[in-house]
Amino acid sequence: MLIPEVRQKWANPINTVTIGATSEEGGTRTCTVTVGGSTTLPFLHFEGKIPHRPVIAMEVLDIIPKDWSALLGEHFSDVWDDPTK
């Protein structure tokens, strides 16, 4: 028995937001980052459009997080208590 392919259509795209402004736009940045605009869920490019590359954000901390996994410490312990590094 074949399972039919189910695709869910989204009526509206995710809002687009541009972070930062170049000097031509009255800001101080050399480049900007635009997120949003997708008409599908992440990584399902065959169901809609994903006009901007995914962007990863992370918290900037100035104290060592007590509730983070030790596995994260293997990668971030040299910088997670000093946001200037």
Image (tube, grey):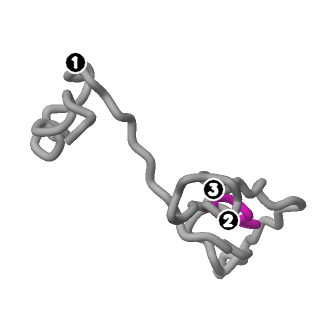
- Identified at 61% across, 61% down, the residue is 22
Dot 2: what SS? Answer: helix
Dot 3: what SS? Answer: loop
- Marker disc for residue 21: 3
Q: Is residue 15 left or right of residue 82?
A: right
* Nearer to me, 70 or 82: 82
Q: Mark 3, residues whose alpha carbon is within 10 Å: few (<14), some, or many (≥20)?
A: some
Q: Nearer the viewer, mark 3 or mark 2?
A: 2
Dot 1: what SS? Answer: loop
Which region of the structure is painted magenta?
Answer: 34-40
The mark that comes first in sequence, 1 or 3, is: 3
Identify residue for label 1.
66
The C terminus lies in quadrant: top left
Q: Amino acid at mark 2?
A: Glu
Q: Is residue 85 left or right of residue 51?
A: left
- Identified at 14% across, 46% down, the residue is 75
* Nearer to me, 3 or 74: 74
